[in-house]
Image (cartoon, rainbow, N blue to C red):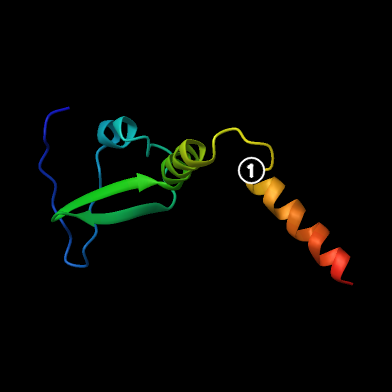
Amino acid sequence: MTAIKAIMSENGGVTFPPDVRAAAGLEHGGPVVIEVVDGELHVRSIKQVMDRARDIARKIIGDQPGGSVDDFLAERRREAEAED
């Protein structure tokens, strides 16, 4: 995609054109995560952030039994019940 010119409003808002939103996976609107990395703005959807976090977790944990968040929470519930 070619760089585009956008105008920032006085209150800091920027409207991204539809083709840019679509290319970035942001075409449905909603909340985004904005990070400044080496002076650049990185804008990602919550889904993109969660997908990346899952990929990182998979690389670290792999597909081990008990490695999912659901497994972790279930284990904590069992421990809490055992303490009662």
Q: Amino acid at mark 1?
A: Ser
Image location (x, y in percent) of residue 48: 42, 40
Specify whether 82 is left or right of 3. Answer: right
Residue 24, position in %: x, y?
A: 31, 35
Q: Residue at x 24, y 38 (%)?
A: 17
Would you place residue 62 above or below residue 77 in this image? above
Looking at the rendered structure, the number of numbered marks drawn on it comes to 1
Q: Residue at x 30, y 30 (%)?
A: 23
Q: Is residue 64 left or right of residue 5?
A: right
Residue at the location (71% across, 46% down)?
A: 71
Which image quarter holds the N terminus?
Answer: top left
Asked where in the image residue 22 lies, by quadrant, the reply is: top left
Q: Relative to the observer, which residue lies in front, 7 or 37?
A: 37
Element type where label 1 sits in the image = loop
Could you classify mark 1 by the number of other residues whose Cα lies within 10 Å: few (under 14), some (14-19), or many (20 or more)? some
Q: Compared with residue 31, is residue 62 higher up or lower down, i.e. above or below?
A: above
Position of 1 compared to 55: left or right?
A: left
Q: Position of residue 81 (x, y in %)?
A: 86, 64
State the image quarter where residue 28 is shown: top left
The residue at which mark 1 appears reads as 68
Q: Nearer the viewer, residue 43 or 84?
A: 84
Q: Nearer the viewer, residue 35 or 75?
A: 75
* Residue at position x 25%, y 48% in the image: 42
Q: Picture coordinates of residue 3 (x, y %)? A: 11, 35
Quarter of the image for the C terminus: give it.
Answer: bottom right
Q: Is residue 73 above or below residue 81?
A: above
